[in-house]
Amino acid sequence: MPSFPLLFDLGKQKPTTRDIANTVKAGGRDALTDAERRADAARYQEVTCRSALNRVKGMPFEWTLNPYRGCTHGCHYCFARRYHVQFEMNADDDFASVILVKHNVAAVLATEIDRPAWARELVAFGTATDPYQPIEGHYKLTRQCIQVLARGRTPMSIVTHPLQRLRAVRALVDAGINAGVLMAPIVPGFTSSRSKLERTIKTIADHGARFVGCNVMYLQDGTRVHFMKFLEREFPSMVPRFERLYVKKYPPEAYRKEVQGLVRALQERYGLTKRGEANPEEVAEEQSEAEQVGFAW
Ligand code: SF4
């Protein structure tokens, strides 16, 4: 039988997240032999995604987008820790040291928003890990996705880290874009004091933000287990207070209202509003221009 040489070597197909879960389940995370260990000691595993946009329910947005899974910042309170369990990894060290990289996310996104059915609804970045964690400097996937959405005149919001982002808020507001800040999570006893909130909100106002909002920390599944282990290790005297406050995944409503009331008073003091309240006519106009951006920490 004649044989023909291959004209192109298409290279090894990257695994999907399901392949990753199966591999780790069978052989532990060390079975991820293609994961690249970089200078920060984390391991980066490229994966092929079949969809870029995820539809969600019960949130202030319909669609989410996460170019990476896992996050090297490794915040103890991070709600996304528990999602790593989906890949058969743990919500502790694995979450912060084995990062999945959706290498083809921007190309898939472009296909999705080119569909005639795409209604240009708001897309929320970073709902399951920081889209600007350090590896973004190498892959630039978040940047590519933003370019795709901007070309498709699709509104977006971004959850990420503060200081550089406040400078970005200033630049966006100066460019006429309705940009603001979501402070999240507010961690009871750590970042919930009036003085810390006031300092933060004043800084947000100083950078020209148009709105500010807040969410109190919630603890669920692997994140809850991880956070309580962290407290026992580093702040054992606080454990009984958190056990009382977090009988359920959220603190009692009365506590959340107290924090929200404090934030509300500070919003007014510094001339900020809740998201969507800033000059409704302007907001409506700007939203129709598909340019709403939010930053959070
Ligand atoms: S930076 Fe955000 S995504 Fe990363 S660990 Fe911290 S809270 Fe989680």
Image: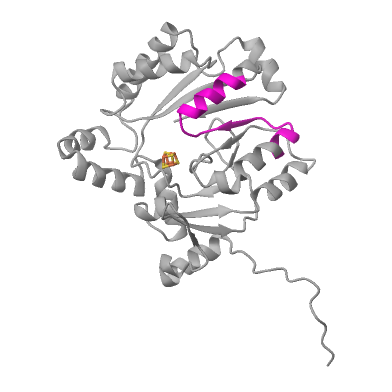
Q: Residue at x 51, y 39 (%)?
A: 127
Question: Residue 115, located in which quarter of the rendered image?
Answer: top right
Task: Please indicate, yes or no, whether residue 180 appears anywhere in the rendered image.
Answer: yes
253 in the magenta segment:
no
Q: Residue at x 36, y 17 (%)?
A: 199
Above or below: residue 139 compared with residue 264: below
Q: Nearer the viewer, residue 285 or 57?
A: 285
Q: Is residue 54 left or right of residue 188?
A: right
Above or below: residue 159 compared with residue 10: above
Above or below: residue 101 compared with residue 3: above
151 in the magenta segment:
yes
Residue located farthest toward the right when viewing the structure as drawn: 2
Q: Nearer the viewer, residue 159 or 204?
A: 204
Residue located farthest toward the left when viewing the structure as drawn: 237
Q: Looking at the rendering, in which quadrant would you find the C terminus?
A: top left
**Way the structure is coloured:** one colour
Q: Residue 218 at x, y = what percent? A: 36, 36
Q: Is residue 79 left or right of residue 226?
A: right
Q: Residue 196 at x, y = what percent? A: 32, 20
The image quadrant where one finds ligand 1 is top left
Q: Residue at x 76, y 40 (%)?
A: 117
Question: Residue 31, located in which quarter of the rendered image?
Answer: bottom left
Task: Please indicate, yes or no, whether residue 54 appears anywhere in the rendered image.
Answer: no
Q: Residue 162 at x, y = what percent? A: 46, 29
Say how many tags the image has.
Answer: 0
Magenta region? 148-172
Q: Nearer the viewer, residue 162 or 38?
A: 38
Residue located farthest toward the front when viewing the structure as drawn: 39
Q: Residue 185 at x, y = what percent? A: 39, 31
